[in-house]
Image: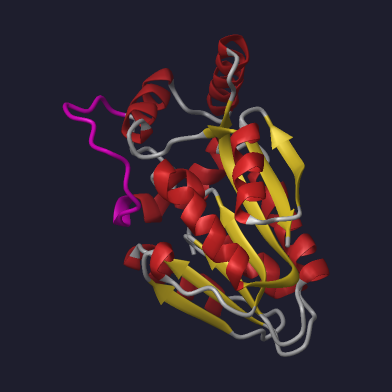
């Protein structure tokens, strides 16, 4: 399957509409995510490693907001717990269609995978040992995030985990600006122009709302998790693991 280059924002746009995961984004998503998110490949690999440690026999592992199924595949290739399956959820039919194609190419362990086209907030979480939100929560309206964390916590078995990856914000203006500039430098180093960076940022402004690490830790504690640990950070992108 040929990897297409992300050039969605390469030409000046008369009107910049809010970012959405439509067919245009799906076609270039692998290139977009690799060139936009520092450490993305490392995060995906380690989601598989962490999930393999915590997956429990006879349980479900959820990939909420699975996009093209990268985290689903990482878990499928690592998990060895018996009678374990993966439930991958996304609200973009185009994303799921491509994810099914990519999953069909995987020759790894035949852990059952169920793909569901739905708003992840409407999916019942039950008998779970692993739940993954990989750059997904940031697209949920902030007032609705605690309720989602509480639902995930309630659906996890004791000892189960949530892996939460997010773009993060900083409360100190100087640190916030530093990390924004470093991220933009990263994108420039990966071939994006200043025009592309600016237009993409405008498209995401009202759609993706980052929060501070302190906010994430506080919310996870409020939801009931016994602890939450930062295991990865590169510039303003981070991943945490929270344990029930």
Q: Is residue 186 magenta?
A: no
- Residue 162 screen position, x and y as percent: 66, 59
Residue lying at 33% horizontally and 27% vertically, measured from the top left? 202
Q: Nearer the viewer, residue 149 or 97?
A: 149
Q: Quadrant of residue 26?
A: bottom left
Q: Which residues are magenta?
A: 11-24
- Residue 153 screen position, x and y as percent: 62, 64
In the visual, does 95 lie left or right of 30?
left
Q: Is residue 13 magenta?
A: yes
Farthest-out residue, top: 174
Q: Note whether 14 is above or below 166 in the view shown.
A: above
- Residue 232 screen position, x and y as percent: 74, 41
Residue lying at 57% horizontally and 53% vertically, measured from the top left? 134
Q: Quadrant of residue 108?
A: bottom right
Q: Report if residue 49 is visible in the image.
A: yes
Residue lying at 35% horizontally and 39% vertically, measured from the top left? 207
Q: Report if residue 3 is visible in the image.
A: no
Q: Note whether 239 is above or below 1 in the view shown.
A: above
Q: Quadrant of residue 155?
A: bottom right
- Residue 77 screen position, x and y as percent: 72, 73
Q: Note whether 101 is above or below 171 in the view shown.
A: below
């Amino acid at each position: 399957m040929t990897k297409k280059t992300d050039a969605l924002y390469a030409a000046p746009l008369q009107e910049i509409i809010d970012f959405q995961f439509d067919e245009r984004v799906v076609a270039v998503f692998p290139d977009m995510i690799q060139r936009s998110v520092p450490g993305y490949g490392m995060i995906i690999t380690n989601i598989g490693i962490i999930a393999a440690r915590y997956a429990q026999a006879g349980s479900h592992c959820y990939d909420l907001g699975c996009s093209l199924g990268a985290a689903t595949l990482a878990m499928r290739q690592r998990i060895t717990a018996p009678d374990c399956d993966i439930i991958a959820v996304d609200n973009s039919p185009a994303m799921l269609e491509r994810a099914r194609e990519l999953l069909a190419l995987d020759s790894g362990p035949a852990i059952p995978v169920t793909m569901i086209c739905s708003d992840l907030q409407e999916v019942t979480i039950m008998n779970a040992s692993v739940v993954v939100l990989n750059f997904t929560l940031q697209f949920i309206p902030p007032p609705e995030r605690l309720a989602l964390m509480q639902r995930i916590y309630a659906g996890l078995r004791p000892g189960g985990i949530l892996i939460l990856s997010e773009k993060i914000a900083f409360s100190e203006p100087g640190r916030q600006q530093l990390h924004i500039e470093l991220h933009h430098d990263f994108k420039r180093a990966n071939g994006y122009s200043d025009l592309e960076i600016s237009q993409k940022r405008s498209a995401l402004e009202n759609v993706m709302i980052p929060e501070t690490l302190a906010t994430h830790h506080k919310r996870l504690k409020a939801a009931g998790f016994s602890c939450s640990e930062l295991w990865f950070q590169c510039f303003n992108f981070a991943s945490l693991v929270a344990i029930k």
